[in-house]
Amino acid sequence: MLAKPDHVFGRSREWQGLVRFVSAGGGPVAHGGAALGVVSGRRRQGKSFLLQALAEETNGLYFAATEATEAESLRLFADAMTRYTRHVPEFPFRDWNDAIAHLFRSIRDRQVPVIIDEFPFLTRTSLALPSIIQRELGPGGSGRKSVARLVLCGSAMTVMGNLLAGQAPLRGRAGLELVVQPFRYREAATFWGIADPRLAVLVNAVVGGTPAYRHEFTQGDVPVDVADFDSWICRTVLNPQTPLFREARYLLAEESEIRDPAIYHSVLAAIASGNTTNGGIANYVGRKSDQITHPLNVLEDCALIVREPDLFRSGRARYRIVEPLITFYEAIMRRRWPELEIHRAESVWGSLRHTFLAQVVGPHFEAVCRDFALHAEEGVYGDFPAEVGSGVVADPANRTQIEIDVAVLAAQESGRPKRILSLGEAKWGETMSHHHLSRLGRARDLLQAKGYDTSETVLACYGGAGFTEELRVAAQGDPGILLVDLDRLYEPG
């Protein structure tokens, strides 16, 4: 296995997958011929950085497409091929039929990656390009006598997702399908060099795990401690002189499928404000539920939001914004944008800091706790989690509903009731007590009455502000009670 370069932080699993694909060349089309890989992921996640490192370490070809006409793109690609192979094509490329055939004919002796980054820029002006690649990889195509490992990469999630979907020409042709995700919360804290877990959550609630925001967008500015956090907010994300200031707007504008930004911003604002159900979103934006189905689907396809089913109510779901910076923009920045543009960050932040803690950090902390549960070892909940999410448990006797922030389910076994490994509540700014534990116990009893197996359900409290002494004493020696504080969340593991 080719060692990952020291300058590439994390991404060990992604690196292993890329190296395995390049060296072994597995996949449906790899039997003695070229192979196809597809790498995707939202912008700023370090895909290009990773692939450039791969090209350097394997002496492969890296070509970054630009927004250009087909003719100019062909000339740029021809120049890149010439520099790499040191062989000038006999004739200029007339179209991508010539270019792809030349690519495969030129790489027959060494099994190396040929990386085409920002592939959606090319398909925008050359719609037939995926079909051309498919033909050349197929029987009788030039790829059959090549050992090239063609890697197509892009950030336009709808375009990249459609490359291998349904009846798409390249469906079934890829030997690698890699999605580069943001860093998880622990990895993000290490990447930012933040050791204080409370500060780590606050920063993560704003910039998430996007690598580019650490250096390129903030010039390496990291809050020194929790006391410096407010100042850091004002001098970075709320500062019109930094690229981070307009980044959330650009993330939406860069998606080609979004043609009417107004409705999409309103939908995102609704979710950021706590209106996370279909009906709640529709009511917030002043539309009927069926009128927001398309915007929700587009935002999902763009990987900007995710639909999370209610684990205890069939057919019910909530939406969550995937990119924390968008949540921060919609909840904090968008409503006070004119003031921020004239450098009034301190006054705006002073009046909206409470909103930030309630609408941004609170829900984000819940998501972090679900991430903790999803990757927990067997001993934490008594078994490996198979499904982690949230849900609502109806309590008819008390005419109320109990919200479960972190529900952990075991794998379904045939002929047995579904086992609930844990029911949990997460509180960022409130000290947790027996009151929270009692509510979870009530939810457990109600779910048992509905047919769930709760015989070994662990009641979990995830406390950003800690726990009362009474609750700590009760949890000691009781395997049915789990207390997870910030230090536990950020324990290496």
Image: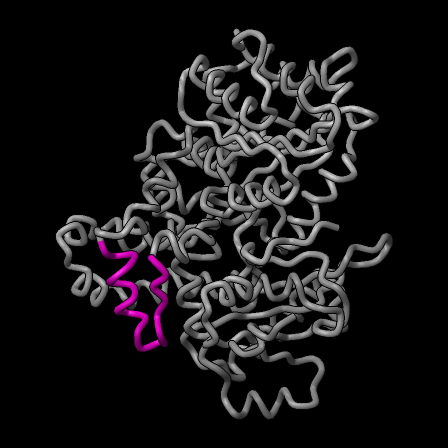
Q: Is residue 262 left or right of residue 375?
A: left
In this view, the residue in front, 252 or 20, is: 20
Residue 442 is inside the magenta segment = no
Horizontally, residue 1 falls left or right of residue 165, namely: right
Where does the image place residue 55, in percent across and percent down from the top left? 60, 39
Residue at (40%, 54%) from the top-left corner? 213
Residue visible at 46% across and 53% down in the picture: 210
Q: Is residue 167 visible?
A: no
Residue found at the far right of this picture = 415
Q: Is residue 236 magenta?
A: yes
Query: Does residue 124 sit above or below 363 in this rendering?
Result: above
The residue under the point 53% across, 10% down is: 93
In the figure, residue 332 lies in which quadrant?
A: bottom left
Residue 465 position by quadrant: bottom left
Q: Which residue lies at the image location 35% right of the left edge and 46% below the top edge?
A: 248
Residue that lies at the very extreme toward the front in this rendered image: 86
- Residue 239: x and y, percent? 23, 56
Considering only vertical position in the picture, is 88 above or below 45?
A: above
* Residue 363 visible, this orientation: yes
Left or right of 254? Residue 405 is right
Q: In the displayed structure, does residue 417 sit left or right of residue 152?
A: right
Residue 185: image x %, image y %? 52, 63
The quarter in which the C terminus is drawn is bottom right
> Would you identify the image quadrant in which residue 232 lies?
bottom left
Q: Which residues are magenta?
A: 219-239
In this orientation, which residue lies closer to the viewer: 105 or 243?
105
Query: What number of labels is visible?
Result: 0
Depth order, front residue of 100/109: 109
443 lies above or below 303: below
Q: Position of residue 114 (x, y in %)?
A: 62, 30
